[in-house]
Amino acid sequence: MPIEVADAVRVALRLLDEEGLDKLTVRRLASELGVKAPALYWHFTGKRALLDHMTNVIVAPVTAALPPAGRVPWVRWLEDAASALHAVLLGHRDGARVALGADLRVARSLGDLAERAVEVLHADAGFSLAYATRAAGVLVHFVLGRAVEAQTRPDETAERALFSQDGFPFPLMARGMRERLAAGATPAGDFACALEVLLTGLRTIQADGRR
């Protein structure tokens, strides 16, 4: 029976959540599907191609739910898009690493998100098209990077132990982290704070009319 790409990707996502990215290979997927690896290489030339298809499926719900340009204020659109992308990547084990380096011609949903961010930045915020592409790229790469960090950082217990050590070589950062943890900081709050910094920068640049 021929293998459908959608079925293979669905199984690949299950394997990802169960075993993690490092153990996911085209051969491992073929074994799970009960076929020989060459049957899958017809659809996926290698692991990167498989990850591109997986990225497309992971991000698709985000793009589908975003409102058209002009429907909401541009800063809110970017905030909602970034927050939704961050959440959906965290919804899968190693989800952010899957999307890193994706070919947007295959991972079309991620490409569509970036394209629509460019439209919002250009049409609604008034940035030049050249600058809008830069800013949209910054936003997407920021979310990917923060999601990778969130999925690889130590848990709260280990983090508290790390920054409580007198031997930590960066005393100001350790003190600041202890203050944040004491105030109830969470990974979600850390992301929201970092996103606010990025969006405030874009707002300031837009208000100054520099781009």
Image (tube, rainbow, N blue to C red):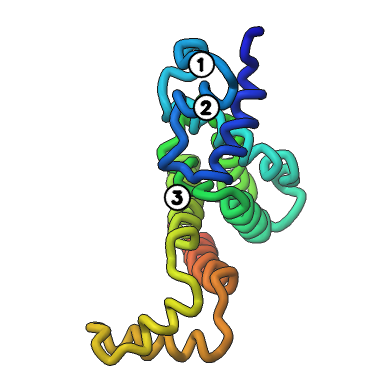
- Badge 1 local density, few (<14 within 10 Å), some, or many (20+)? many
Residue at coordinates 52% horizontally, 23% vertically from top-left? 31
- What residue would you read off at disc 1? 40
In front: label 2 or label 1: 2
Indicate which disc, 2 or 1, sits on the residue closer to the N terminus. Answer: 2
Secondary structure under tag 2 reads helix
Residue 141: image tag: 3
Tell me where residue 5 appears, x and y as whole percent: 61, 20
The answer, for residue 209, to whether it is visible in the render is no
Tell me where residue 37 appears, x and y as whole percent: 46, 16
Residue at coordinates 45% horizontally, 30% vertically from top-left? 103
Question: Label 2 sits on what residue type?
Answer: Leu
Question: Image quadrant of residue 53?
Answer: top right
- Badge 2 local density, few (<14 within 10 Å), some, or many (20+)? many
**Which residue sits furthest top?**
1
- What residue would you read off at disc 2? 29
Label 1, label 3: how many angstroms apart (C-alpha)?
30 Å
Q: From the viewer's side, name the closer residue of 101 and 31.
A: 31
Labelled pair 2, 1 in contact (Cβ < 8 Å): yes
Indicate which disc, 1 or 3, sits on the residue closer to the N terminus. Answer: 1
